[in-house]
């Protein structure tokens, strides 16, 4: 399946991510983890965004949770260079924060069908793509790790502590569960809602 995927990890409500495009117009989506799974399977999904003809595009999270940015080409052809970064502070979005239902594009459906058919004939389950398959030059954004949290000031993933190791801002006293998105205090070793072992 031909799309670019950025895993933003656990984010608080109201975080703004900025996406840049160079080349063709492209579909740009900000979606939570359950809808990311639907997107990969070629099912209808809910997201903020849509077809974007100019950039930068700023999208904003609407709840605490695990968020993703997906960029694809409507007809499946062409090239687009992309970049992204989490913005610090309260930056207004340029795209509505109301989630819209989208259907998979024809190109996406063809790609999913071809990929599934190839895997079935080889006796393998359909894999979930993890790497961008289009040309991408993302802004630096470390991937989530068990021992890292996102700084509320600069958005960079850093080790838990009183201050961000990148910008020096005081860190929040919360640790977001990557499974159920519950906010836990840093002294919690396990999530108070689902029992998942947290970093620590």
Image (cartoon, rainbow, N blue to C red):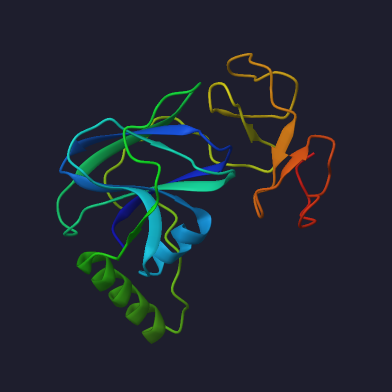
- Pick the front one: 78 or 87: 87
Q: Residue at x 26, y 44 (%)?
A: 135
* Badge count: 0
Quarter of the image containing the N terminus? Answer: bottom left
Residue ID at (69%, 43%): 146
Furthest residue in direction top, as rendered: 168
Q: Residue at x 24, y 39 (%)?
A: 81
Q: Quadrant of residue 139?
A: top left
Res 148 → quadrant: top right
Q: Could you tell me which residue is drawn at 68 percent across and 17 percent down?
A: 170
How far across and down, in percent of the image, does residue 2 sit?
A: 28, 58
Q: In the drawing, does residue 147 fall left or right of residue 36? A: right
Snapshot quadrant of residue 53: top left
User: Taking 7 as reference, is 100 above or below it?
Assistant: below
Left or right: 188, with 110 as reference point: right
Query: On screen, 92 above or below 21?
Result: above
């Amino acid at each position: 399946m031909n799309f670019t995927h950025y895993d933003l990890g656990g984010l608080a409500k109201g975080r703004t991510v900025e996406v840049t495009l160079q080349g063709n117009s492209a579909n740009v989506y900000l979606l939570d983890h359950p809808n990311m799974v639907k997107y990969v399977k070629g099912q209808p999904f809910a997201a903020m965004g849509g077809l974007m003809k100019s950039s930068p595009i700023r999208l904003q999270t609407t709840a605490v949770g695990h968020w993703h940015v997906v960029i694809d080409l409507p007809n499946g052809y062409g090239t687009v260079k992309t970049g992204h970064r989490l913005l610090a502070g309260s930056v207004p979005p340029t795209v509505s924060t109301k989630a819209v239902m989208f259907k998979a594009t024809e190109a996406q459906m063809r790609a999913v069908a071809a990929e599934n058919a190839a895997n079935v004939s080889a006796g393998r389950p359909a894999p979930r793509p993890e790497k961008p398959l289009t040309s991408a030059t993302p802004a630096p954004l470390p991937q989530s790790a068990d021992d890292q949290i996102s700084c509320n000031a600069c958005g960079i993933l850093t080790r838990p502590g009183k201050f961000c190791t990148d910008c020096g801002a005081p860190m929040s006293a919360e640790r977001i569960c990557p499974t159920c998105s519950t906010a836990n205090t840093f002294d919690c070793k396990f999530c108070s809602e689902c029992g998942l072992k947290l970093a620590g």
